[in-house]
């Protein structure tokens, strides 16, 4: 959790004691607060694919930028996971400083995993019980706390009078309160409080109802050409045991034509089969006639006959009437949506889970991703023009997720060497990544045309990409090498989230994408390893992991098993996993490893739609750095970026930031 003094107090205290401003030697008079810097953060933009498509003549605008002295690969984080990487970018620190090590963190005493970037604290006072109703006594309610530590570079700019706009930068939920403008990005939940839960309504007998990863499948009852679907919303804390509030959608099907009317109670639209709706508002009643929560969804009418099939997006927080803090100032999301239209607010809006569950097919996923990208184009056009016409100076950061999310889900479509490549796939899928890079080339060209030569334009990514061909079952490797023991190996398939492990006879275990923990006595519940033996055991395991070879092809499985002490610095090193496991190109932690399973197989092909990844050896997946300003550095990593941006405004970096300016 981040603890920050009020900026005014800090400024006055330091100025009085040191005769300087909060962050360093620069004074307000020294700062170039009339300068302009625009940063386009394109998650997952890969230097190898970028060069390949430039060589094919597809990316003229990138080619103009990517000339000698204006491009270098950008080193990513260890591990190269997006919340870790973007935290490095924001703070100029490695995870030992900011405390984000993986998507999944682990409570070492309870061995219960939790999301690493934010947590919800309940109200300070219990509600007053009146029958089944609960009356809140703490009017501030539950609070969401950001868990990333360290000062973000845009806070430093604001303290020096440099205005900033941060559009959906990851690892900034809830958004930090500054004098600037910000919309939260990765980490922002849907209205249910999840990373995104879709609803699929169907009467197709071949589709089993129930919960799937990232979604709910409802059985549709079609009566008189009418279907009523029920959406789950946030927990209703006004009622005993906080059941989820619900909202209904009524669908009226045309008896002759492939058309249906969708009615949410607040909005109504007519859809043809194969058509997507715009944003439709939904209302979740908490207290009848008194309290309700507004959300919004997009709907896709997949089929009406012979079976009814309707996809409903996760219920997004409506930026026009946000139920949770998603912007700073609070009315910025309202202002932006009124000017440029409502937009996806959930952390990663491309619905990868619906494709993984085969609710959407790859073509439908690509279409849904296209809606996201078109929304982002519209918002960039608005924000860049507002920046030039109204803000006129300072920093504009704008984030895109489409390259990353399409890379995850469509890699196998373009990669003939992937074990589940579809050689007969349609051209729009096999060419999807090329088309995506072309779309971003057009965005870069438009942005350059809008900016003058005095404005510094930076295009960057947090990591690159790689095929994900083979799954490595890390807990199985630990078991086979004598570091992990199961209570009952015959029931291994029933055990998940580290259940079923014989802790007294287990010295190491894994959960998450790149994290390996030692079972240390006095630190982990039921620990078995003496603290004095921890370091030697970590080095032993790292050495053996770096020798792991796939017997099927003779290739290394792990190429970067490192100890936390060797790569991290700062106050949170002791909270880090004991080892960080970087897999060779083409390999990644198995789906079972991420949830603490111990499968029987050591290695297996990845047969999922999620076929590209970057959670591996950080050296195999560098990001990209391009600029219209000459880059003096021959190499750099994400921790250099905040220092570089601060230097553009002649602002000294705070002591926590150890990087150097690339310019």
Image (spheres, rainbow, N blue to C red):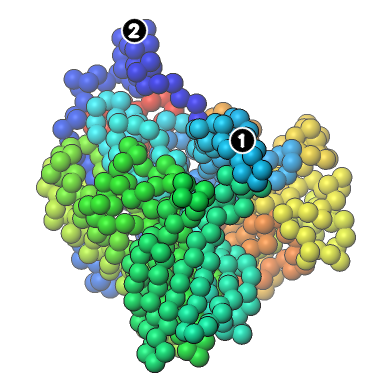
Element at badge 2?
A: helix
Q: Quadrant of residue 63?
A: bottom left
Q: Is residue 264 left or right of residue 106?
A: left
The residue sitting at 57% across, 49% down in the picture is: 236
The residue sitting at 50% across, 61% down in the picture is: 247
- In contact (CB < 8 Å): disc 2 and disc 1: no
Depth check, mark 2 against mark 1: the one in front is 1
Q: Quadrant of residue 642?
A: top left
The residue sitting at 30% across, 43% down in the picture is: 332
Question: Which of the marked residues, 2 or 1, is nearer the chain's N terminus?
Answer: 2
The residue sitting at 74% across, 41% down in the picture is: 110
Element at badge 1?
A: loop
Q: Quadrant of the N terminus?
A: top right
Q: Is residue 36 above or below residue 508?
A: above
625 or 144: nearer the viewer:
144
Q: Which mark is residue 127?
A: 1
Residue 186 percent location from the top left of the image: 45, 50
Q: Is residue 611 left or right of residue 130?
A: left
Residue under label 2, please give it.
Answer: 16
Q: Quadrant of the C terminus?
A: top left
Residue 604 percent location from the top left of the image: 67, 71
Residue 251 percent location from the top left of the image: 44, 75
Residue 464 seen in the current view: no
């Amino acid at each position: 959790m981040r603890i920050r003094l009020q900026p005014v107090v800090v400024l006055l205290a330091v100025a009085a004691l040191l005769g300087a401003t909060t962050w360093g030697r620069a004074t307000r008079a020294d700062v170039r607060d009339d300068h302009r810097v625009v940063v386009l953060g394109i998650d997952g933009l890969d230097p190898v694919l970028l060069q390949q498509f430039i060589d094919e003549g597809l990316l003229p605008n990138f080619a103009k930028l990517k000339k000698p002295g204006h491009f270098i690969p950008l080193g990513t984080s260890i591990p190269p996971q997006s919340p870790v990487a973007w935290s490095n970018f924001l703070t100029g620190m490695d995870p030992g400083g900011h405390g984000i090590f993986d998507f999944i963190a682990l409570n070492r005493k309870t061995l219960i995993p939790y999301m690493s970037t934010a947590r919800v604290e309940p109200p300070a006072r219990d509600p007053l019980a009146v029958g089944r109703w609960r009356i809140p006594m703490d009017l501030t309610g539950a609070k969401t706390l950001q868990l990333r530590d360290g000062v973000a570079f845009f806070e430093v700019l604001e303290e020096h009078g440099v205005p900033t706009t941060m559009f959906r930068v990851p690892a900034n939920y809830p958004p930090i309160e500054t004098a600037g403008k910000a919309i939260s990005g990765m980490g922002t939940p849907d209205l249910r409080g999840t990373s995104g839960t879709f609803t699929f309504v169907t009467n197709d007998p071949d589709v089993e109802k129930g919960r799937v990863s990232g979604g709910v499948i409802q059985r549709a009852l079609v009566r008189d050409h009418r279907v009523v679907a029920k959406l789950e919303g946030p927990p209703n804390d006004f009622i005993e045991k906080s059941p989820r509030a619900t909202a209904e959608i009524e669908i009226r099907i045309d008896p002759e034509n492939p058309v249906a009317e969708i009615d949410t109670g607040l909005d109504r639209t007519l859809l043809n089969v194969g058509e997507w709706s715009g944003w439709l508002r939904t209302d979740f009643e908490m207290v009848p006639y008194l309290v309700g929560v507004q959300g919004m969804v997009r709907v896709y009418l997949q089929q009406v006959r012979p079976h009814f099939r309707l996809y409903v997006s996760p219920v997004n927080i409506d930026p026009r009437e946000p139920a949770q803090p998603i912007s700073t100032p609070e009315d910025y999301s309202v202002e932006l949506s009124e000017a440029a239209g409502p937009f996806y607010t959930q952390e990663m809006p491309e619905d990868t889970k619906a494709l993984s569950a085969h609710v959407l097919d790859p073509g439908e996923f690509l279409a849904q991703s296209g809606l996201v990208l078109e929304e982002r184009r519209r918002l960039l056009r608005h924000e860049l023009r507002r920046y030039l016409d109204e803000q006129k100076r300072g920093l504009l950061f704008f984030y895109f997720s489409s390259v990353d999310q399409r890379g995850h889900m469509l890699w196998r479509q373009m990669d003939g060497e992937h074990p589940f490549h579809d050689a007969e796939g349609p051209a729009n899928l096999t060419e999807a990544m090329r088309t995506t890079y072309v779309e971003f080339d057009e965005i870069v060209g438009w942005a350059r045309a809008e900016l003058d030569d005095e404005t510094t334009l930076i295009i960057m990514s947090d990591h690159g990409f790689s095929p994900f061909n083979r799954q490595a079952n890390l807990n199985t490797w630990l078991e086979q090498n004598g570091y992990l023991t199961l209570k009952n190996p015959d029931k291994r398939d029933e055990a998940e989230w580290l259940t079923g492990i014989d802790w007294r006879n287990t010295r190491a275990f894994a959960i998450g994408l790149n994290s390996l923990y030692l079972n240390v006595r006095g630190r982990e519940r039921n620990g078995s390893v003496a603290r004095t033996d921890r370091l030697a055991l970590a080095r032993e395991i790292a050495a053996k992991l770096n020798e792991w070879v796939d017997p099927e092809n003779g290739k290394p499985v792990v190429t970067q098993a490192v100890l936390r002490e060797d790569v991290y610095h700062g106050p949170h090193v002791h909270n880090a996993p004991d080892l960080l496991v970087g897999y060779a190109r083409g390999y990644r932690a198995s789906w079972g490893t991420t949830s603490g399973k111990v499968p029987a197989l050591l290695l297996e092909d990845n047969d999922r739609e999620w076929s590209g990844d970057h959670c591996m050896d950080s050296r195999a997946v560098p990001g990209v750095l391009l600029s219209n300003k000459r880059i003096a550095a021959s190499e750099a990593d994400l921790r250099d970026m905040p220092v570089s941006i601060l230097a553009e405004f002649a602002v000294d970096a705070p002591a926590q930031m150890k990087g150097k300016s690339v310019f």
